[in-house]
Amino acid sequence: MHLFYTPDIEGDIYTLNADESRHCVRVLRLGAGEAVSLVDGKGTWYEGVIERAEVRGCEIRITDRRELYGRRNFHLHLAVAPTKNIDRIEWMLEKCTEMGIDEITLLHAAHSERKVVKEERLEKVIVAAMKQSLKAYLPRLNPMTDFRQLVTSCREPHKFIAHCNEGDKKRLDEVYRPGEDVVILIGPEGDFSEEEVVLARHHGFVPVTLGTSRLRTETAGIVACHSIDFMNRV
């Protein structure tokens, strides 16, 4: 199956952009008459046939469309502090997108070692992972956001903060019920500060543990994403 990302698709004829056209014609070597699939990142899956195979603009005729393709009954928002080594956070975004995630916020916390990210690069990683995993919804990537700003403005009904500090913490399966919208905060390599945990709790975030092992930031993000996804499948 050959899948292309077409966020601005309208009508029954669509022309792939330069990058997707080049990939279609030069890399995949597809020609006129061959079947392809398209997604708009908003939940619609399209089937189509190549009408004109050109590197600068490959023209597709739409033959079928399915709306709300793979739609889930819950919203998973992961807010994570980017790692100093950006490759690790890219890997996490790739895997979380493959499993299923709806929204990602990049956090600037007290112990953050990275304050700037190239959002365009991360967006490309997410798009590629969406296509790889045959999904029709593109996770929303929010820009770098200050920790205080996020916790004081967050409106999700169920809010959790995963940290390694001492204190009473619940397992995710003890406090999360399938079908609920949820946001989970994951800290930087140095973890959240005690002051940040106190602030989060003051604004309704429930402290949770992701297990007995001390996890890297990107591992914690994947574990949190997988746990919520798994609980919504059983």
Image: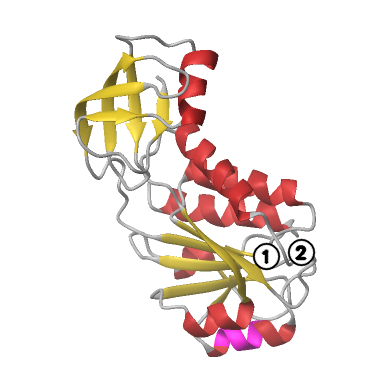
| Mark 2, secondary structure of its residue | loop
Amino acid at the residue labelled 1: Ala
Q: Residues within 10 Å of mark 1 (few under 14, many from 20)?
A: many
Question: Does the magenta portion include 105?
Answer: no
Q: Which mark is residue 81?
A: 1
Locate residue 215: give its quadrant. Answer: bottom right
Question: What residue lies at 38% left-to-right and 60% top-to-bottom?
Answer: 75
Q: Which residues are magenta?
A: 197-201
Q: Is residue 193 above or below residue 112?
A: below
Question: What residue lies at 61% left-to-right and 88% top-to-bottom?
Answer: 199
Is 87 in front, or is 74? 87
In this picture, residue 74 sits left or right of residue 227:
left
Residue 89 horizontal/vertical position (percent): 68, 51
Question: What residue lies at 53% left-to-right and 72% top-to-bottom?
Answer: 160
Residue 165 horizontal/vertical position (percent): 73, 76
Kindly report the distance in space between the C-alpha atoms of the residues bearing marks 2 and 1. Answer: 8 Å
Locate residue 216: give its quadrant. Answer: bottom right
Quarter that holds the N terminus: top left
Is 225 in front, or is 35? 35
Q: Are marks 2 and 1 in contact (CB under 8 Å)?
A: yes
Residue 31 in view in this figure: yes
Instruction: Report the magenta stretch's main SS.
Output: helix
Is 205 in front, or is 45? 45
Q: Which mark is residue 114?
A: 2
